[in-house]
Amino acid sequence: MGIATLTRPIGRPNNLLVVAQVMSAALVGVQAALVRVEVDVAPGLPAFHTVGLPDSAVRESRERVRTAIRNAGFRFPSDRITVNLAPADVRKEGTSFDLPIALGILAATGAVENGRIGPFAVVGELALDGQIQAVRGVLAVGLACRRQGIDTLVVPVANHAEARAVDGLQVLPAPTLRVAVGLLNGAEAAAMPTPEPPAPAVTDDLDFADVRGQSHAKRALEIAAAGAHNVLLVGPPGGGKTMLARRLASILPPLTRDEMIEVSTIWSVAGLLSRQGELMSRRPFRAPHHTASVSGLIGGGSPPHPGEVTLAHLGVLFLDELPEFQQHVLESLRQPMEDGHVTIVRASGISDFPSRFQLVAAANPCRRGCPSLDHCVCTCAERARYLGRLSRPLLDRIDLHVELPALAPDDVQAPIASDSSATMLARVGAARQRQRDRLRAGGIRVNAAMSPRQVRRFCAVPAEGERLLAAAMTRLGLSARGHDRVLKVARTIADLAGADSLAVEHCAEAIQYRGLDRQWRA
Ligand SMILES: Nc1ncnc2c1ncn2[C@@H]1O[C@H](COP(=O)(O)OP(=O)(O)OP(=O)(O)O)[C@@H](O)[C@H]1O
Ligand SMILES: [Mg+2]
């Protein structure tokens, strides 16, 4: 009998006094680890203990389990019940162990029969009347089951759509404890309504066609979308920085199937997947307010929860009014931006969260938000101090610095004649295809993710370009990282132009997006 099946050893003479075990899972970061729920019912004064590093929500499950078992019409044993959650070194949190504990007790008392179905696992929270409520992280649990050779998962009905996305997993949705017992005893699962075909992408009415002027910024955002580069927009108030940044999502290619599972797993662990449990089909776009804390942005707490950088994984993190963020919060972004993941260490263990996001930031050039340099009432020192809040290492990680001019009255009144998001998306899609073809062997998809070795290999620059780059390094004070990032942007510009090799003009355009390096940090 596999560890995943429910067992009732017959070592004791009284059939009521036995050990049962049911598989379930605990969330560790954005992954799930299988947990064996062992239930021992032994003679003695009535008692109910839970051991094996449970948090308070798991300990409280005793009352829910006891009441739900009775209200579902089963007998609750008046013996000494010990529940062990193994392995003991994995922290168990939340309410998803209610259902496996209840089923373990019912197995020990004979209400659930042994071996009626193959290896299975169970997650679900119990309401007092025996109804089963949705839990977080079911997608991660389903993936863990498949990795460990468990092919059946009993889930709350509300998590059915989500669990069904795991290939090769048989999902048994149970609305109540009584139905869950029936399923384990071999009853047929009720047919669930066939899922609606995914709704067409939500048209949230954000289109680049609405933006007047600012063609330089639009071009930079197209490059950013094509190569997944980070971008900073700097300009006077009301010039369209927020408007432009929010439209970036409209020119990003849709998620692939694997990416949908990856992103949805994170959102499910965070409890943010839609009520219908449908997978995320659009790239995430997260826009936290500038009062965000380090733990809100990076993740943290005990047990650790994913932060905004993880919720933006494979999507966009938009930080509006960048210099208004607390400086130590901004600095905490450096490691996840560089490594593509965040490691949070707590006494209870280490959690690793993915964080491959694209940063889009916006800033005014000065604290008072003066309309233009000519009309700025701030002193030079004040201006330098404001953008100086963005440290050199942070700026170094931003590939495209874009300065927006204030819109001239002519620009505002002229009819809009700029590319729509659909036109830009088509160009971005073609450029991404070129990158995928070139980078497939390296296991990455976008230019921004190239390793230093891949930069050497794929970004060979003609002699004149080398000279231009060397001059820029001196003039702008670029670091070696900055130099590589310029080359990556140049590669994306060439991909947008459909060019196989880098030309001088690609390098020249990439260099001019590093303007802030000199202007504000010299
Ligand atoms: N380039 C533009 N084309 C069309 N409308 C614009 C443009 N710029 C600004 N607007 C109008 O002004 C509004 C405010 O713009 P937006 O919020 O993007 O400015 P901002 O640069 O972010 O300003 P702030 O620095 O104050 O945050 C927009 O919602 C839009 O109606
Ligand atoms: Mg704004």
Image (cartoon, helix red, strand yellow):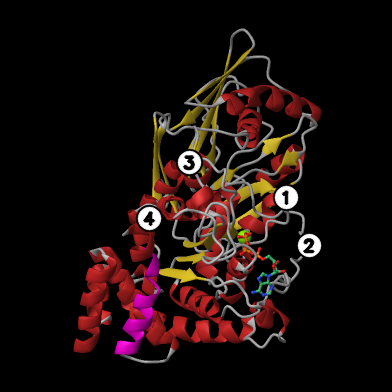
Q: In which quarter of the image is ligand 2?
A: bottom right
Quarter of the picture containing the C terminus is bottom left
Q: How crowded is mark 4: few (under 14 residues within 10 Å), some or many (20 or more)?
A: some
Residue 506 forms part of the magenta stretch:
yes
Question: What is the three-letter code of the residue carrying label 3?
Answer: Val
Q: Mark 3 points at which residue?
A: 294
Q: Does the residue labelled 4 lie within 8 Å of ligand 2?
A: no
Question: What is the three-letter code of the residue carrying label 2?
Answer: Pro
Residue 16: x and y in percent read 62, 22
- Seen at 51% across and 74% down, the residue is 221
Mark closer to the chain start, 3 or 4: 3
Mark closer to the chain start, 2 or 1: 1
The segment highlighted magenta reads: 502-516
Question: What is the three-letter code of the residue carrying label 4?
Answer: Leu
Q: Residue 394 carries which label?
A: 4
Q: Mark 2 points at which residue?
A: 193
Q: In which quarter of the image is residue 520?
A: bottom left
Residue 129 forms part of the magenta stretch:
no
Our reading of the magenta stretch's main secondary structure is helix
Residue 84: x and y in percent read 50, 26
How far apart marks 2 and 3 lie (CA) works out to 43 Å
Q: How crowded is mark 3: few (under 14 residues within 10 Å), some or many (20 or more)?
A: some
Closest to the camera, between mark 4 and mark 2, is 4
Q: Name the residue under label 1.
A: 157
Left or right: where 475 falls relative to 497: left
